[in-house]
Image (tube, rainbow, N blue to C red):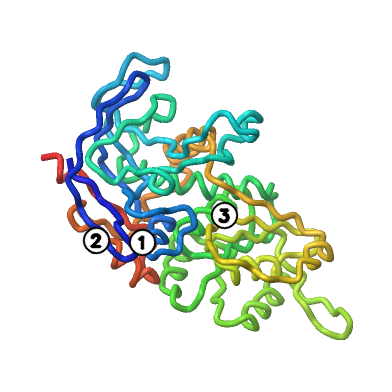
Amino acid sequence: MKAIYITEPGKVEIQDIPKPVRKPGEALLEVLYGGICGSDLGSYRGTFAYFSYPRIPGHEFAAEIVEIDGNDQGLKPGMVVTCNPYFNCGRCYSCERGIVNACMDNQTMGCQRDGAFCEYITMPIERIYDGTGLSPKVLAAIEPFCISYHGVQRAGIKPGDKVLVIGGGTIGVLAANAAKALGGQVYLCDVPQAKEKLERSQTTFGFAGTILNESPQALEQAVKDITGCVELNGASTGCGFDVCIEAVGLPATFQACIDCAAFGGKVVLIGVGKQNLDFNFTLLQKKELNVYGSRNALKKDFLELIDLVKAGKVDLEKIITDVYPFEQAAQAFEDFSTKGGSMLKVGLDFTGIHG
């Protein structure tokens, strides 16, 4: 079968490899559709923390069951499904406490182990979730929605909370949608290079507003304008956002979340990076900030969001802006890397390679 490999930063190849053979307790799946995640893009650029070369990328996908044993989940050949791609060890302290998404030896498909961007894969049956009739294109977007949804839930957003989401990519836009669904007044923020993407997201999803982060001063002024000004020691400052969500993975954007958060506010870190941040940590104490990490997602996140999308509460298809056939994977990665300011979610269509 054919598989997509990132062989080194900036290089994508399609290679021929053996078709997998399923073991007891596994299903053989034919991949139908995949989404290029921000972490896949980081792997392509050489900036992602959890990647080694060469590797098959991909953990956002939909597939059709080809072979499967009898099971108590009602899964059968021919069903279109999506999967939980975060493999936990089951033995570490986190797993023992049920925090399987933060397994100390976590191996996510396409990151620490080979991913789904190939014709066929095998998956443990317990990691496979019925797509309930959703299209493969939409099902492949459930996983990134889970990442965002899990992080937003960590913040405990209440109706009326002012929420800042820094990062106008897929994860940021989906986090903004999740926060909005919980009643938050959501503002989506990104740099000038992503202006077109910000405007499209605002038009499509109707957030409370957007912020163009042209400079630290511009961001500070936006916080004052949106959250109200107060006078402290002779200088005006913004009251700050109740919740700030970081969905980029850069030191500067994490610092911005800390700076923009209200006293007693919450900061959620979803973005993944590999650079250090040197900052005045006393600001966490001074503001009494609640800072949350958010990693991966849980089975309940997948099941809840499949139901939510099935019910028409969120139209995931609107985030998919560009689709490439499997054979053009190298072009898809290159375009996403160089034209990301206008591309929100890039999909790969695998159906053409199955004949």
Of mark 1 and mark 2, the one earlier in the sequence is 1
Residue 258 lies, with reference to residue 296, above or below; the image says below
Badge 3 marks a residue whose secondary structure is loop
Instruction: Give the amino acid type for the residue marked by disc 1 in the picture.
Output: Tyr
Could you tell me how far apart the alpha carbons at marks 1 and 2 are, in whole angstroms? 10 Å
Q: Is residue 229 left or right of residue 173?
A: right
Question: x, y (%) of residue 245?
Answer: 61, 59
| In the image: residue 142, left or right of residue 101 | left
- Which marked residue is nearer to the observer: mark 3 or mark 1? 1
Name the residue located 31 percent from the left edge and 66 percent from the top edge. 10
Residue at x 27%, y 52% (from the top left corner) = 5
User: Could you tell which of marks 2 and 3 lies nearer the N-terminus?
Assistant: 3
Residue at 45% in and 65% down: 203
The amino acid pointed to by label 2 is: Ala
10 Å crowding of disc 3: few (<14), some (14-19), many (20+): many
Query: Which residue is label 1 attached to?
Result: 44
Q: Is residue 257 left or right of residue 339?
A: right
The label nearer to you, 2 versus 3, is 2
Q: CA distance from mark 3 to mark 1?
A: 19 Å
Reading the image, the residue beneath label 2 is 330
Tell me if residue 91 comes above or below residue 171 in the rendering: above
Q: Image quadrant of residue 142?
A: top left
Q: Is residue 57 above or below residue 136?
A: below
Are the two marked residues, 2 and 3, in contact with CB atoms closer than 8 angstroms? no
Residue matched to label 3? 270
The mark total stands at 3
Find residue 82 and report its horizontal and vertical position in percent: 37, 36
Q: Secondary structure at mark 2?
A: helix
Residue 323 x, y percent position in the rendering: 26, 56
Q: Quadrant of residue 288?
A: bottom right
